[in-house]
Amino acid sequence: MEVDEPGRFVATNRLGHRVVVDWSTGLVQLPLDRYLLLASPAGSDLVDVALDRAIERCMADAGFPEFAFPERPIRDDVGVHARRYGPIDPTQVAANGFGVELETAHQQALEEFQATPLDPDVELAMYGEFDPSMTAEEHLEAGGCVFVAGATLTGTESGEFFGYAQALANTTLNLAADEPEVRDALQRWSDCMIESGAVDVAHSSPLSLIATYPRTTPDPDPEEIRAAVADVRCKQQTRLVFEWAAAEARLQADVYERDAETFELIRDEQLELLNTAADQLDIALPSELASLIQPSE
């Protein structure tokens, strides 16, 4: 199945796993994203907020019922790697060049809270007798609410399997760049960039272009914005992102089949954590996350 319409490309690989590119939202979704649920903004925000509430309950039990984190929004966004091929949102690059918005409302709320010093008694209840050399189990025994709540919700596992899935998903980026149709699209993109007048030197890919604009200040200069706007326009004209994502989708089918049992185990473990977090908050899973979880048709 393939749907190719202005600003949006949706297809499935031979295993029925989806690939989505949406210019209007900047979303790039690849087949193995179904096994990287905690790497998405929706997944990580959900767990963060569930941890906030679990810590608050622990602090109340410890004699600090007034302790509370700020309310933090949970994004309905499953973009594990929205900038995998560089930015694709025309509005975003016109404002920020190759940079990104440094803070989300979710992060900003926590940072403002962390900037306020805690009373020593509250800090002790939060962290226990903290020592960086202690193991997770030792921190749990010390009784700090951060560690108690974390162990209750997520356990003390290292996340080794999740890192394994993420590493495998990342291998297909460079492998796909060597596929003939992607090499052709990269050449068309490079030619387009030169013809635009936004750059004087040919670049092998959008990622190498971005590397030539290191930031020394928060705001982009006009030259960077001009190059970033041309980059997105040339990606659209040459279908580079569609070709690259489709090639990755094919390769990720092979990656999945080589270790399908492990991938399903990783997915089940993440689902268990996400469902626990949602249950503790008495909410449904964010809709885009729930959609990603559903079996492919």
Image (tube, rainbow, N blue to C red):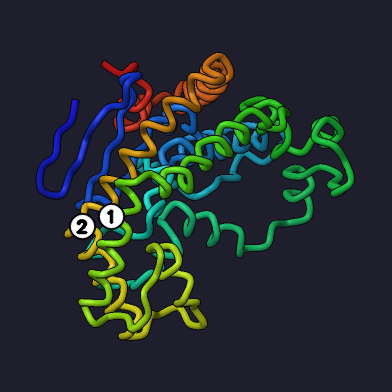
Residue 87, percent from left and from top: 34, 60
Question: In the figure, residue 91 lies in which quadrant?
Answer: bottom left
For mark 1, what is the residue?
A: 185
Tell which of 119 and 139 is nearer to you: 139
Point out residue 212 in the picture as x, y percentages from the top left corner. 46, 76
User: Residue at 33% of width from left, 42% of height from top?
Assistant: 245
Quarter-of-image position of residue 166? top right
Residue sticking out furthest to the left = 6
Q: Position of residue 190 (x, y in %)?
A: 31, 67
| Residue furthest out toward the front | 180
Quadrant hosting residue 165: top right
Q: Nearer the viewer, residue 6 or 77?
A: 6
Query: Which quadrant does the C terminus fall into?
Result: top left
Query: Label 2: few (<14), some or many (≥20) within 10 Å?
Result: some
* Viewer-closest of 195 and 2: 195
* Residue 238 image label: 2
> Residue at left 30%, top 76%?
227
Q: Look at the image and tell me whether residue 272 can be seen.
A: no
Amino acid of disc 1: Ala
Q: Dot 1: within a 10 Å radius of its alpha carbon, few (fewer than 14), some, or many (20 or more) residues? A: many
Compared across the picture, whether 102 is left or right of 4 comes to right
